Amino acid sequence: VSFLKMLSLKLNTNTVQFFFNHATESFPLFTEASKLIVHPENMVRTHIRNLTLNVYRVAASEGNVREYLRTNSNGFVVLEKLAYWLRDQSNILGRFLQVNGGTIMAGSHSPERIKEMANDVIDETYYIQDVFSTNIPGVQAKLSDSMLENVYFPVLIDGLRNIHSNGGGEVDGKSWGPDCCVDGDEAGAHGRGAMGSLLAMFLLTQSLLVLNSKRLSSAI
């Protein structure tokens, strides 16, 4: 990861020819980085996201790289992974908050862990805004559509209907806690998803405050 980061710092409009092969439409530096974009370790994610931002910034003034990111399937992988990661982390955060009576349990469900998870989601939102700010039209549109399709419509906007607001307790005689339905198989039996209305409103508000995308905000 450190080596990839070091290479990205050398990346500019003059050196990009050594990393990007226009003839074969291959960009190993970006492709390898995309495999780690949602790594479980925060430090690794930070390094890789800084690397990808360097690529996007170079692409803003380098036509071949820009076209690769706008049209090549490898260029879309990063954007889709970002949307999937944000979707999953939002749902996991919702599950962590679903504890009996809305209380916080000790151990892995401590307030510190929940705060850490919430900060990860918010940090992701700022990173997405950094990608938007590179002003690459095809990238902006693809990222907006991926976010709407995988995060905002199915998770956050749908979560506004769940008035349980991530409190715990029982639904139809069945317990509902942070370890319940983590694979989603039993969610229908409880009649509600992971995302409660208050958490959904909080995350939507954060998104609208941070993200500067007319395509996304108009759809929401």
Image (spheres, grey):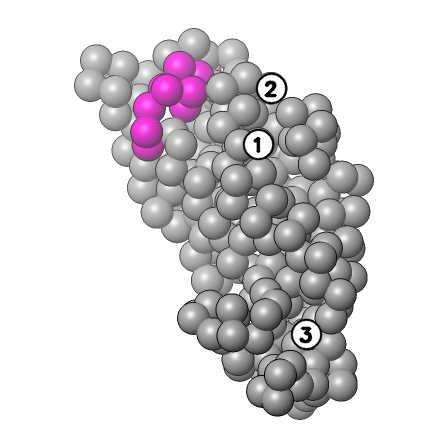
Residue 72 visible at all: yes
The amino acid marked with disc number 3 is: Leu
Q: Is residue 69 magenta?
A: yes
Q: Is residue 122 magenta?
A: no
Closer to the observer: label 1 or label 2? 1
Foreground pick, 21 / 74:
74
Q: Quadrant of residue 132?
A: top right
Q: Quadrant of residue 11?
A: top left
User: Between disc 2 and disc 3, whose residue precedes?
Assistant: 3
The amino acid marked with disc number 2 is: Asn
Q: Residue furthest front?
A: 172
Q: What element does badge 1 sit on?
A: helix
Q: CA distance from mark 2 to mark 3?
A: 36 Å
Height in image: 91 above or below 5? below
Q: Residues within 10 Å of mark 1 (few under 14, many from 20)?
A: many
Q: Is residue 102 left or right of residue 43?
A: right
Residue at 60% x, 44% y is: 153
Q: Residues within 10 Å of mark 3 (few under 14, many from 20)?
A: many
The amino acid marked with disc number 1 is: Ser
Q: Which residue is mark 2?
A: 135
Q: Which residue is mark 1?
A: 144
Q: Which residue is mark 3?
A: 97
Closer to the observer: label 2 or label 3? 3
Q: Residues within 10 Å of mark 2 (few under 14, many from 20)?
A: some
Could you say where residue 173 lies in the image, as x and y percent from the top left? Answer: 61, 89
Foreground pick, 15 / 106:
106
User: Between disc 1 and disc 3, whose residue precedes?
Assistant: 3
Q: Main structural element of the magenta stretch: helix, strand or loop?
A: helix
Foreground pick, 213 / 162:
162
Residue at 41% x, 23% y is: 69
Q: What element does badge 3 sit on?
A: helix
